[in-house]
Amino acid sequence: MRLPSKRRAGAAIAACGAVLTATALAGPPPAGAAPVKKPVLDWKSCGDPDYPTLQCAMLEVPLDHAHPDGRTVKIAVNRLPATAPKEKQQGPILLNPGGPGISGLWMASWIPSQLPPDVAAAYDWIGFDLRGSQGSEPHMACDPNYFVGPRPDFQPSQGTTNTWLKKTAGYVKSCTEKYSWLLPHLSTVDHVQDMESIRQALGAKKINFFGWSYGTTLGSTYTQLYPNRVRRFVLDSIVGPSISWYDHNVQQDLQHEKRFKAFTEWVAKADNVYHLGTDADDIEAKWYAMRAKLRANPVGTIGPDEFDDTQVAGGYNILRWPRLATVLSAYTNSGDTAPLVTAYNRYAAPDPSDDSFDLYNSVMCSDSKWPRNFRYWQKDQAKVNEKAPFYTYNNMWFNAPCLYWPVKAGHRTKITGKGLPPVLLFQATDDPATPYEGGLDMARAMPSASLVVERGGGSHAITFSGNQCLDDLLVDYLRDGKVPANRGLIDRTCEKNPDPDPVWVAPAPAIKATSVTGNVPRQFRT
């Protein structure tokens, strides 16, 4: 199938409108909030029956921190206050689960529930939603139906490239029309400046921080911009400090391919459970055959792309492998689609309450430069796909809005680590979402950091996942500031937990929220 010409791709970009910058907003901002001179948090009960002491507030911050007397936006914040005696309290600890754009409000109650009582009691646990996302105001909603399936096949061999270009350009056009005034102010630096506003509103001289995934970019950028405000910072599953987001995605493609092959090898050792054979290559072929059948005959809204999304979840958490193997076995051997439907709903189905994709694009496309010529993407991604066919085009189209994004991209903040106290880093060697090189690069960039490596670990966000070695080191740091002895670039190695036992996973009811502040997001479910 002939791919679109450079002229057609350029026309799609032009349709999205002129480039927006932080100093030249498209269209006059609506009249509204008065200027905020000092950030203020007016705490009120969240009304959560499970956590009656949990407090909620909205923090008003400048849209543009360089112009504090201008328009404002609001950040959703919550707090589980410290209960230890005053002399044993360790101040606020800000929490971010990554995304960017996943809500952080659930973390304020969940994280301390995973810790020893004395550590949990010592901190004010602060959850927050990034500007433009989730409970913050405004809450971006560019195209709520963008992920409704079955979507056109990601694979260009199916003749869907023009369809995806048009779909992507239409999505960006919708974002631009609705939020042209907001889009230039959604970079990582903007969010870090909001974190500093939270610190000021809390009245704390310094803050602590815990972040997974993109949260490591938030945390490391904060240490660079406000080093004298840093106390204890934990970065888990680390984005490299200087890599462009485009190049980071290529690393993801290659690592997800390895994790998919690790999955098929694991299934091949469990023929007595899944009855898919003992040859990993044959099992991989059966997976692709299932994908092709779903293209021809979707199961409700589940087509090939939705199947991809469901399987990708296994790269984030190895404990999902038994369920995903059950999906493949049930469909292949008996045509049973019930396990597929359950897994899709659990891991990948569009969630009306989660618009993190809009904020994700706003950050990714603003933080670093992306190729704007689609012909470059075509050639480059085709080369990557030769090595990593499992995830390349899924990842490409997920990030394709950056082809057309109307904000002029900047550069990621250079991390030097100067003037910092000890920082604790966690990284798995086989993490597909934030590949291992990122953890090594962050350790090199931060002289005061201690790097803990989970050898052979293939999951993402590795603390609080059942590895006692990792969690004990985290507890020691949060309790006393203790870090592993300096042994070079890698200061401590923890062995991964055993792979999950191969079991047949029967479909289970959909997860229901149990708290008014939200339960654990799907990204962290098994």
Image (tube, helix red, strand yellow):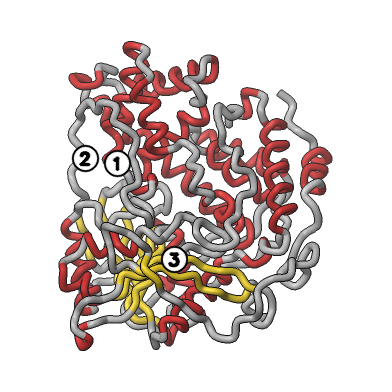
Query: Badge 2: few (under 14), some or many (20 or more) residues near its Cα, within 10 Å?
Result: few
**What is the quadrant of residue 215 in the picture?**
bottom left
Residue 271: x and y, percent? Answer: 22, 20
Q: Is residue 441 visible?
A: no
**What is the quadrant of residue 396 in the picture?**
top right
- Where does the C terminus fall, quadrant-wise? top left
Q: Is residue 161 visible?
A: yes
Left or right, 162 with reference to 205: right
Query: Badge 3: few (under 14), some or many (20 or more) residues near its Cα, within 10 Å?
Result: many
Q: Secondary structure at mark 2?
A: loop
User: Tag 3: residue type?
Assistant: Phe
Left or right, 115 with reference to 130: left
Whole-number angstrom distance, CA of label 3 to CA of label 2: 34 Å
Front position among marks 3 and 2: 3
**Up-down: is 309 above or below 292?**
below
Residue 171: x and y, percent? Answer: 68, 44
Question: At 42% from the left edge and 49% from the top edge, which residue is drawn?
Answer: 433
Q: Earlier in the sequence, mark 1 or mark 3?
A: 3
Question: At 59% from the left edge and 42% from the top edge, which residue is drawn?
Answer: 144
Query: Badge 1: few (under 14), some or many (20 or more) residues near its Cα, within 10 Å?
Result: some
Disc 2 designates what residue? 499
330 or 355: nearer the viewer = 355
- Mark number, residue 526: 1
Left or right, 175 with reference to 386: right
Question: At 81% from the left edge and 46% from the top edge, which residue is drawn?
Answer: 15
Residue 489: x and y, percent? Answer: 32, 69
Q: Secondary structure at mark 1?
A: loop
Whole-number angstrom distance, CA of label 1 to CA of label 3: 24 Å
Residue 80: x and y, percent? Answer: 31, 69
Disc 3 designates what residue? 128
